[in-house]
Amino acid sequence: MRRRWQYLALGGGVLLLVGLVFVGVLGQPVDTSGVLLTPTARVAHDPVNEQSGVVASRTYPGLFWVHNDSGDTARIFAMDRGGRVVIPEWLEKRDFYVGPPSADKSKKPYPGITVDLANNIDWEDITLGDGNLYLCDMGNNGNARRDLGIYVVREPNPLSVHRTRVLGWVPVEYPEQTEFPPRTAWNYDCEACFWFRGHLYFITKHRPAFRLQVPSVDANLYRLDQMNYDRVNPLRKIDHHDNLGGWVTAADMSPDESCLAVLVEAPVQSVWLFDTPPQGDQFFQQAARRLVFHGAGQAEGLCFIDNETLMLTNEGRQIFELKVSDFKPASEVSRTAKRKAPR
């Protein structure tokens, strides 16, 4: 989530929200409960300047797809587990470099893979399914957007190409939303998507109306049942969680589809692991494990490296790794790390 100017139409007038300076803003204290995380790597490539979503490639083992937050051009990067951005060899020899600035002043920093026919209004997460990348332009801080959707891109070969194009744009909407923005709760922002059994899923990020920096701790789970390119597709609400400890900023399914990982930000940073339901897809009703932590900065990216390890990334280019074996039953963690969102 980039903190920026947002203009919202309301009752025929215009409300201007200015970063952190507006009525209702409440600064969030740093919560130091749980495990102190230490980075395992850093993305040392300047164009990756506000890393948001991340997902492990299934076609190119050991590589991970990442993208920047809103305000960037429409592009994606592939990197390895150590944060090194991948570039086609022929481009690196000729025009570009990756990593720290090159001594060869004729070379420029590699700009990543351009996604033609796309715009990054507010890309917040990325996921993979059926050989496609799904770029989720679902960021909606002010709950006023009516152009939410997902770009569908065939997964490119990051060792060979530097441009690709979208297969299609899937426009979506929340059927429950009738005001833009609503006058009460703002429950139509989303920074977390994942693929499960042939469907895209989305977990919403909530806040009180007109209080941009005040998190609500509940969340809704939606499923996309249709993927039409020529009409708006309604999202179906299928589940709800009353208290995740903060707002949701990323999610991913384990490679074996045994559990769903959900990254939660302020006021308490944590990752939840929800067991996959024996039937259906109401993940929030299943047994859960949780790891509470601090020291991860503004963490907005989460994906499974393998069934036993998670990668967590933040907007400061840091990379962290979490072991599934370190997670405890959520009921035990809640007794020692219970927090309420500020009112």
Image (tube, grey):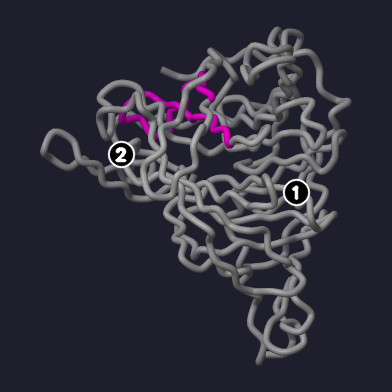
Q: Is residue 82 visible?
A: no
Q: Does 209 lie within the magenta span?
A: yes
Write the residue at 35% across / 30% down: 211
**Which amino acid type is shown beneath numbered disc 1?**
Ala
Residue 319 appears left or right of 136: right
Q: Position of residue 249 (x, y in %)?
A: 57, 36
Write the residue at 62% across / 69% down: 113
**Which amino acid type is shown beneath numbered disc 2?**
Ala
Q: Is residue 208 visible?
A: yes
* Mark identifier at residue 56: 1
Label 1 neighbourhood size at 10 Å, few (<14), some (14-19), many (20+)? many
- The one nearer the camera, 68 or 89, is 89
Label 2 neighbourhood size at 10 Å, few (<14), some (14-19), many (20+)? many
Write the residue at 72% across / 34% down: 253
Disc 2 element: loop
- The one nearer the camera, 192 or 323, is 192
**1 up-or-down from 35: above or below:** below
Of the image marks 2 and 1, the number of the one nearer the N terminus = 1
User: What residue span does the magenta drawing correspond to?
Assistant: 200-221
- The one nearer the camera, 298 or 65, is 65
Identify the image quadrant of residue 89: bottom right
Q: Position of residue 36 (x, y in %)?
A: 77, 33
Residue 11 appears left or right of 130: left
Disc 1 element: strand
Residue where numbered disc 2 is placed? 144
